[in-house]
């Protein structure tokens, strides 16, 4: 476990040592795809749960 912490600490120090603009670019390159993937997974998961609960709005009936 200590080995993993050492690797992470060195990576963190490398990121902190970068100038501001490359830090922002690096964070955006990592976080934007990560957040998009998480949003997609949540969307698919909730859609499946709504189908199981028969709350699917894609088959809405006209009154």
Image (cartoon, rainbow, N blue to C red):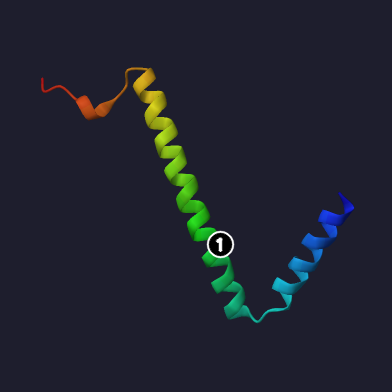
Residue furthest to the left in view is 63
Question: Which one is in front, 17 or 4?
Answer: 4
Q: Residue 22 vs residue 14: left or right?
A: left
Residue furthest to the bottom in view is 19
Q: Residues within 10 Å of mark 1 (few under 14, many from 20)?
A: few
Quarter residue 58 falls in: top left
Task: Identify whether 15 is placed above or below 19.
Answer: above
The residue at the point 10 percent across, 20 percent down is: 63
The residue at the point 54 percent across, 73 percent down is: 25
Task: Identify whether 63 is placed above or below 17.
Answer: above
Residue furthest to the right in view is 2
Q: Which residue is mark 1?
A: 30
The residue at the point 32 percent across, 17 percent down is: 54
Tell me where residue 32 appears, x and y as whole percent.
Answer: 49, 59
Q: Residue 13 vs residue 41: left or right?
A: right
Give the total of numbered labels: 1
Tell me where residue 62 appears, x and y as whole percent.
Answer: 11, 23
The residue at the point 15 percent across, 22 percent down is: 61
Residue furthest to the top in view is 53
Q: Residue 16 vs residue 63: left or right?
A: right
Tell me where residue 16 appears, x and y as whole percent.
Answer: 72, 73
Tell me where residue 31 appears, x and y as whole percent.
Answer: 54, 59
Task: Identify whether 54 is placed above or below 6.
Answer: above
**Secondary structure category for the residue under label 1:** helix
Quarter residue 47 falls in: top left
């Amino acid at each position: 476990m200590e080995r993993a912490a050492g690797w992470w600490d060195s990576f963190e120090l490398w990121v902190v040592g970068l100038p501001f603009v490359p830090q922002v670019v690096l964070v955006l390159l990592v976080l934007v795809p990560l957040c998009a993937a998480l949003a997609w997974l949540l969307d698919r998961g909730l859609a499946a749960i709504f189908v199981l609960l028969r709350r699917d709005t894609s088959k809405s009936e006209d009154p």
